[in-house]
Amino acid sequence: MPDKQLLHLVFGGELVRPDSDQFVDPSKLHIVGIFPSYEDAYKAWRGATGQTIDDAHTRYYIVHLHRFLDPAADDHKH
């Protein structure tokens, strides 16, 4: 059986304040994509953050979707 698929979502957008996690307009979030591993998600995250490095109000996140899909799983991987 192949390794368990560990999906990760990369998204971001403009924050109300740089020290906040609240978005100015959640309907305008930039969904970078869903990736099959943390490593792939991290590469996409780095690419997105690199494009907005001079904008303190824009932040990108990696969400571990596999933890939402199977919260009971004892997963110590990214």
Image (cartoon, grey):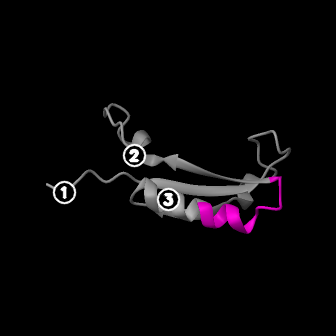
* SS at mark 1 in the image: loop
* SS at mark 2 in the image: helix
Callout 3 amino acid: Ala
Q: Is residue 44 above or below residue 17?
A: below
Q: Earlier in the sequence, mark 2 or mark 1?
A: 1
Residue 57 in the image: x percent, y percent?
Answer: 83, 53
Q: Which residues lie in the magenta part? A: 46-57
**Placement of the C terminus among the 4 image quadrants:** top left
Horizontal arrangement in the rendering, residue 20 relative to residue 62 (left or right): right
**Placement of the N terminus among the 4 image quadrants:** bottom left
> How many residues crowd around disc 3 within 10 Å: few (fewer than 14), some, or many (20 or more)?
many
Residue 11 in the image: x percent, y percent?
Answer: 62, 57
Q: Label 1 belongs to which residue? A: 2
> How many residues crowd around disc 1 within 10 Å: few (fewer than 14), some, or many (20 or more)?
few
Q: Quadrant of residue 69?
A: top left
Real-space CA distance between mark 2 and mark 3, rounded to the nearest whole angstrom: 13 Å
Q: Label 2 belongs to which residue? A: 66
Q: Label 3 belongs to which residue? A: 41
